Amino acid sequence: MALKGGTVDDSKMEPKEKMRIPPEIFSFFMAPGGHSLIVRGNAGTGKTTFALQVIEDLGTAEDGYYVSTRVSDESLLIQFPWLKDRMISPFKSKTGMEAARPDRMRSGLTKMKGIGGSQGGPVRKEMSISIGKELSDVEFIYDMVEKDRKVRRIFVIDSIDALAERYGIQPNLLITSLQKDLVEGYGQNLLYVLESPEPLLDYLGDGVVVMNRTDVDRRRVREIELLKLRGCEITRPRYLFTLRNGKMMTFNLDFTRRDASNALWSPIPDVDGKVSSGMPDLDRLIGGGIDRGSIVLVELGQSVPLNVAETIERSFVSNFIMLNRGVLWFPSRRVSAETVRTQMSEIVPKEKFEKQVRVPEVASQVELSAQFIMPVEGANAGTDLKWKNVSYMLGGGEQPYLSLLGFDTLESIYGEKVMDQIMDHLGAMKKNKGVAVCVTTQSTNSTSRLSDIASVHIKIDSVGGTTIVYGERPFTECNAITFEADGAIVRAHLTPVV
């Protein structure tokens, strides 16, 4: 079976941010000349889906053909229905018994077919009688290339070891011959899928990638590892990816940016009595939202970027503000109240922030007197955050209140044993049907105790440079988190990793 993609000029190439494969793979194949890529990994790791995705993502720049030696056309269509409009029947070329014509670069093919000796050398005695071999799939590729040598294509052979076995040829000879004739001779792109995960043939390819499955906290995730891409800089050696609807998707670190609309945060209202985190995908992950009276633990792994924590905190706070609710906020990283107000002024109205939000600061360190600053003594969190004081300070907003507590900040003010002091505050939030969101990091001492009392426990970590989110309570699958920026508003999106 062969799969054909379209061909357009370079000016119409698909933007990289819309691609599903790692951008290094795209750059590798689009560089001048021909290139060969070996893809290996254990069964079920996504090698075939990756190969098909490469064809699709390169389809706006060059033709692509897929030669399958393992799976029938019917089976592929069941698994990958989106292939239907791109499939064509392979053309079976005629195989001659004579040696290749001098104007054709077929020395490797000649060697595989068993016709004549090495190019330019004496004919070996045992090869003096030409018997030939029927290499229809391989000759189809050669005929396609020789029909129009000016067109560069990508040919995917899935799998190269199964094709070699079919023709009784050693895989290294098959790859070496195709490399010499098609890649180096005709400047074509080739992608070889290997059924074996062993690196024995890695030296034969210009590039090598490995597909892996691994576990993260009892959850299975998939990674693609870029071992070698000759002539191409590898900026990220590992990418997390997911397989959904017969397609592969990797996850970029950059924000997807839209034209700034200068609009303020659009709140997500309560549904069935549950309040929103401000992130619909996160609400979905934890069962439709957060019950009033909940303690939510957001646990950040060591390699999680700071902007991830900031985005999540701002989403919670912005949604509560725009629903006219009161917010007590100890920001993570212990930034000043004035800094927080300035950052949030592009997302929510300044007057609403100042009326409804209180950012505690130690009284002896306060340099600015403002309505949104809540002076505290800084000696005991239980005393500073008594419900009577909190409810009075948040009187400008409606209930249910949000208490967002960055525990790195709390521990820097009140010490490592702050949990002993803050239990009354958490109990009061629960009793009065508010929501307490506790954000911790790996350096936080309070995480274990918070996990014991939290009704919702969300973990955020990093795998291969991709940030993942999953629920420990409730137990959920891993989701990759990506971001979309609309001016100053950054929204988080979650994609299940399957």
Image: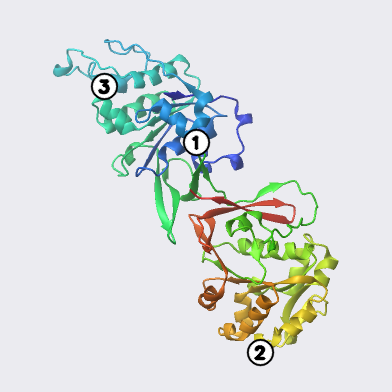
According to the picture, the residue beneath numbered tag 1 turns out to be 53
What separation in Å lies between label 3 and label 1 (alpha carbons)? 32 Å
The spot of residue 404 in percent (x, y) is 67, 72
Earlier in the chain: of badge 3 and badge 1, it is: 1
Kind of element beneath mark 3: helix
The spot of residue 400 in percent (x, y) is 73, 70
| Residue found 45% across the figure and 52% down from its top | 221
Q: Which quadrant is the N terminus positioned in?
A: top left
In the image, farthest residue toward the left: 125
Kind of element beneath mark 1: helix
Earlier in the chain: of badge 1 and badge 2, it is: 1
The three-letter code of the residue at mark 1 reads Gln
**Is residue 223 found left or right of 459 in the rendered image?**
left
Which is nearer the eye, 475 or 498? 475
Earlier in the chain: of badge 2 and badge 3, it is: 3
According to the picture, the residue beneath numbered tag 3 turns out to be 111
244 over 171 or under it: above or below: below
Q: Are marks 1 and 2 in contact (CB under 8 Å)?
A: no
The three-letter code of the residue at mark 2 reads Ala
Marker disc for residue 10: none
The three-letter code of the residue at mark 3 reads Lys
CA neighbours of label 1 inside 10 A, class few (<14), some (14 to 19), many (20+): some
**Is residue 317 found left or right of 191 in the rendered image?**
right
Marker disc for residue 379: 2
From this viewpoint, is residue 229 visible?
Answer: yes
Query: Viewer-nearest of labels 3 and 1?
Result: 1
Q: Are marks 2 and 3 in contact (CB under 8 Å)?
A: no
The image shows a total of numbered marks equal to 3
Kind of element beneath mark 2: loop
- Figure colour scheme: rainbow
